[in-house]
Image (tube, rainbow, N blue to C red):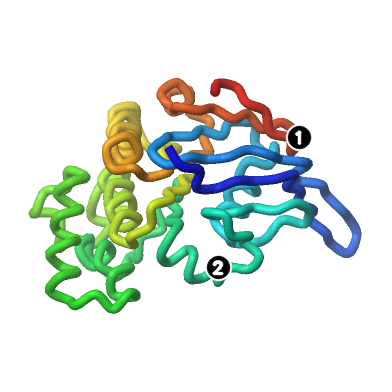
Amino acid sequence: MSEIIRAEQVGYVYQSKYQRTQALTEVTCSFEQGLVYAITGKSGSGKSTFLSLLAGLDVPTEGSIYVEGQDIRTMDRDRYRREQAAVIYQAFHLFPLLTVLENVMFPMNLRKVPKKEARRRAVELLDKVGLPDALHQKMPGMISGGEQQRVAIARAMASGARIILADEPTGNLDSQNEKNVIDLLEGMAHEEGYTVIIVTHSEKIAGTADVVYGMLDGRLEVVRP
């Protein structure tokens, strides 16, 4: 397996006019292709801050993050998120005025994929995540939370990104839909070679991940290699 992301001595400071908060301290770890990683820890431990740095939403205050050997500071980070790293959120973040099918087509539209090809691929991906044809023309608000999360996963796959960053992806789901989402993310890593990194409180996700990192007060430790 090949290393996709490496963090070296990463620190991050939130600085306001009145306060300086050290959110991350000397975080060093790596993420390989084809594996599922869980990052666990209490609220405020720094795990979501770290995920946002891996997504290129900001850059470290100290240390460096490398994606396939390139420092994330020197990359076009908007392009990185469009083409290499897709984020899946607890709240789904689907476009409410687009249909299920149009939501999945959206990242392909950004990449100028011909409409007919984008539609075919979107249908294929929705089928892959178990969304029946009858739901394709519905608006997100008309389907269940578990179904919306499947749409979000299909949209992430439609981007062409091979790095999937998931922030509490099962936080709003019941136990059966949690299992469905875990199975989908595992399949993406183990069968298709995605790198899947999940920030989670879920013991189920932590129990099935290939590698578990724990975050405490901004410091990362290996819980299970």
Q: Give the residue type at disc 1.
A: Asp
Q: Quadrant of residue 172?
A: top left
State the separation of the CA atoms marked 2 and 1.
Answer: 27 Å
Relative to the observer, which residue lies in front, 223 or 65?
Answer: 65
Q: Which residue is mark 1?
A: 217
Q: Give the residue type at disc 2.
A: Arg
Q: Closer to us: mark 2 or mark 1?
A: 2
At x 28% / y 78%, what residue is drawn?
A: 112
Residue 125 lies left or right of residue 210; in this view the side is left
Secondary structure at badge 2 equals helix
Q: Quadrant of the C terminus?
A: top right
At x 15% / y 68%, what residue is drawn?
A: 119
Q: Earlier in the sequence, mark 2 or mark 1?
A: 2
Indicate which disc residue 77 carries.
2
Q: Dot 1, crowdedness within 10 Å: few (<14), some or many (≥20)?
A: some
Residue 23 lies left or right of residue 2; in this view the side is right
Secondary structure at badge 1 equals loop
At x 54% / y 56%, what residue is drawn?
A: 55
Q: Position of residue 84 (x, y in %)?
A: 43, 60
Question: Is 157 situated above or below 23?
Answer: below
Relative to the observer, which residue lies in front, 9 or 20?
Answer: 9
